[in-house]
Image (spheres, rainbow, N blue to C red):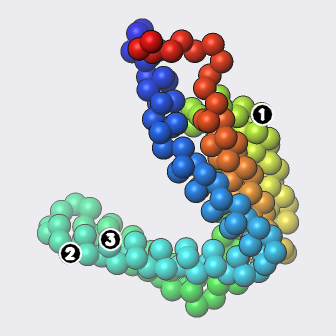
Amino acid sequence: MSESTVRPADLQQLMREKRWIFLAEGILLLCGGFFAIIMPMVMSTLVAYFLGWMSIVVGVLLFVRSAATGPSEDRLSTLVTGVLFGIIGIVLIAWPFKGLEGITLLMAGFCILRGLMDLSGKPVRHSATPGLQVLSGIAGIVLGVLLLLWWPGDALWAVGLLFGIQLIFMGCGLLAIWNSLDHPVAGKAQVGA
């Protein structure tokens, strides 16, 4: 029981000591979000290329792992999975606009999942900015549903625009946490006085 009461205080102290990380992450998310809103087609294409290259790298790593593990039960499945990842990556890089339809569905799932996490209070830091985290959660779910409703017709620009809006909400939440970490909790007893 005493362990559960000590942990949040330790976590809060660690977050205060490393609060610059929240500032840096919040600023980067805001900048990325504004860029995506201003240039949604460019951001959509960048997302497609990023996922394409990431798939190729994962495919190569799986291929290397299947070759390095020697005879085993999962060697063939690892090899096949690596080849499939490589093919997906090549397709996304060769035809990024065709791949955006699939990416739109992935982005919808990401926004909805992130929104549900925010609404459920995950991660634990929700106590610093509960209202903004709830707003971010609602925005994520709404954006995810809009992506599903607009799919596939608006897949080319919707991914970039709505991803940018989600980044801005996430960035604002992190900046609010950064700001709240500067203020000690009201009524907290001073240690070592």
| Amino acid beneath label 2 | Ala
The x and y percentages for residue 52 are: 53, 79
Viewer-closest of 1 and 150: 1
- Amino acid at pointer 3: Leu
Occupied quadrant, residue 81:
bottom left
Q: Which residue does the image show at 47% across and 74% down from the upper left?
A: 55
**Sequence-earlier tag: 2 or 1:** 2
Residue, far bottom? 94
Instruction: Name the residue beneath numbered marker 3.
Output: 62
Mark 1 residue type: Gly
Label 2: few (<14), some or many (≥20) within 10 Å? some
Q: Residue at x 59, y 56 (%)?
A: 25
Residue 143 located left or right of residue 66: right
Which part of the image, by quadrant, shows the C terminus?
Answer: top left
Q: In 3D space, how far apart are the residues under numbered discs 3 and 2 (Cα atoms)?
A: 9 Å
Mark 3 and 1 residues: CB-CB less than 8 Å, in contact? no
Image point (78%, 75%), residue name: 40
Residue 169 image offset from top left, x and y in percent: 75, 52
Q: Residues within 10 Å of mark 1 (few under 14, many from 20)?
A: few
Element under label 2? Answer: helix
- Examine the image and state in which quarter residue 91 appears: bottom right
**Which residue is denoted by mark 2 in the rendering?**
67
Disc 3 from disc 1: Cα separation: 42 Å
Query: Which of the two residues, 150 or 139, is positioned nearer the viewer here?
Result: 139
Q: Earlier in the sequence, mark 3 or mark 2?
A: 3
Of tags 2 and 1, the one toward the viewer is: 1
> In the rendering, which numbered label is found on residue 131?
1
Q: Position of residue 181 (x, y in %)?
A: 60, 35
Q: Check disc 3 and report its element: helix, strand or loop.
A: helix
Residue 90 versus residue 4 in the image, above or below? below
Q: In the depicted view, which residue is nearer to us: 39 or 178? A: 178
